[in-house]
Amino acid sequence: MTYKPTWSRREFLTTLGIAGAGAALIGPLAAWTIDDIDPRVAAIVAGTIGIDTHNHIDVPLNTNELPRPDIDLAGEMKKSGLSAICMTFALDYQRMQNPGEAYERFKNGLTAMDQQLARNGMKRSLNLNDLRSAHQNRRPTVIQSIEGSHFLEGKLERLSESYERGLRHLTLLHDSDASVPLGDVYTNPPRLGGLTAFGADVIKECNRLGILVDLAHCSNDTAIAAMKLAAHPIIISHTGLDTQLGSNEFMAKMMRPRLISKEQAKIVADSGGVIGVWTHLADTPLEYAQNIRALVDVVGVDHVCIGTDTKLTPPYRPQGNFGPPPGGPGPKPGDGPNGPPPGPPKDNGGPNKARVGERTNESWADQKVGFYYAVVDGLLKTGFTADEIGKIGGGNFCRVLGEATGGKG
């Protein structure tokens, strides 16, 4: 997609109050974007806290694979226009066979992310004040997330350790059951009766510490029990309405169990929660904006956010050993947008070659601008106002993060 600005560059900079020497402070609005992007879009991007609430930054999790090649996280964020991402990784894409293995992978992942953040001159935001300060100073930032509680291995005290290392967003479940299960996963046969006693303890401890609870991958029974228990509003960071299946039959079939009904979405909104819409079932930014509109029409603009389930930086896939751990079915090759690749690596650019829709800044074919610019343009064309885009783009997530973390650091 290509934007045709109707304002001059000088008029645009003047509207943002950054004409002259102040233009050097424009931060995410790199020079190349000024000429390519509708100034109305750029002004909204600059004036809102744009957040992807579920973004995979692939890092090596096994000790013998550290360190990985350096990644240009700051550069990709500036290109995207996003102020922040919930930077996540999952532990169960490779089979876990031994006690302590999930915990070791978790620690390796955080260490790798520490190194990459330092290299990129970036810091984790630990609370809402950090997020606002980073946005005000035009510094890209991340909220540390983990997808699945496998690393706990039944040990609640590990939450405090992870909190001290910067974890502020915990997706309770992922594709496979943890060695000590927390609840039923929505893509696996139900066998736990919803939320387990340990899962309830984890939610209570997250509430006590100041960690936002994410119920993506939870079965309906698990999610309802969790929302009744939680002291703060929750998030379902990456899903969509089950009425919005798109035109790709393969993706629709794969993603259908991961979507929610209108009735389920209303339960989340009634609890004060927020629902992230992912990009996988939209072929264009406009279709993505229409999927957001469909959810807004059900739950209201105060309960919807962006949660792409994409990768801002290049994929990193270790060789072999993919498959389920003893605790559950787990992801299979080709299962899910971020799961192990189907079949053996092919010589088509390498096993780490990204596919269309996998990278955040390449979410759609022929995408010419950064992710958030494309989304804001689609939202404007779908009839959303600047204020509404500010809520969807990041304001709603900021609300639930602020309630979860409070004044804690």
Image (spheres, rainbow, N blue to C red):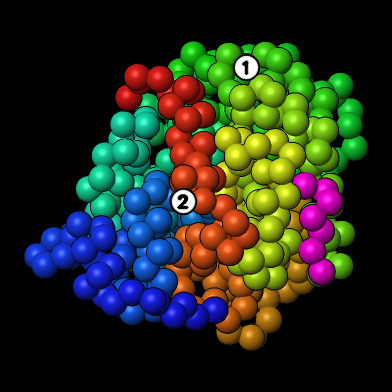
Q: Is residue 245 magenta?
A: yes
Left-right relation of 245 to 269: right
In the rendered structure, which amino acid carries the disc numbered 1?
Ala
Left-right relation of 151 to 193: left
Q: Residue 101: which quarter of the image? A: top right
Q: Find residue 306 and report its horizontal and vertical position in percent.
A: 57, 49
Q: Give the range drawn in magenta.
A: 238-247
Q: Find residue 310 and report its horizontal and vertical position in percent.
A: 58, 59
Dot in front, 1 or 2: 2
Left-right relation of 121 to 180: left
297 over 255 or under it: above or below: above
Residue in view at x 48 percent, y 23 percent: 404
What number of labels is visible? 2
Q: Find residue 39 and report its horizontal and vertical position in percent.
A: 37, 68
Label disc, if present, on residue 230 of the rendered structure: 1
Q: Circle 2 sits on which residue?
A: 386
Residue in view at x 33 percent, y 74 percent: 7
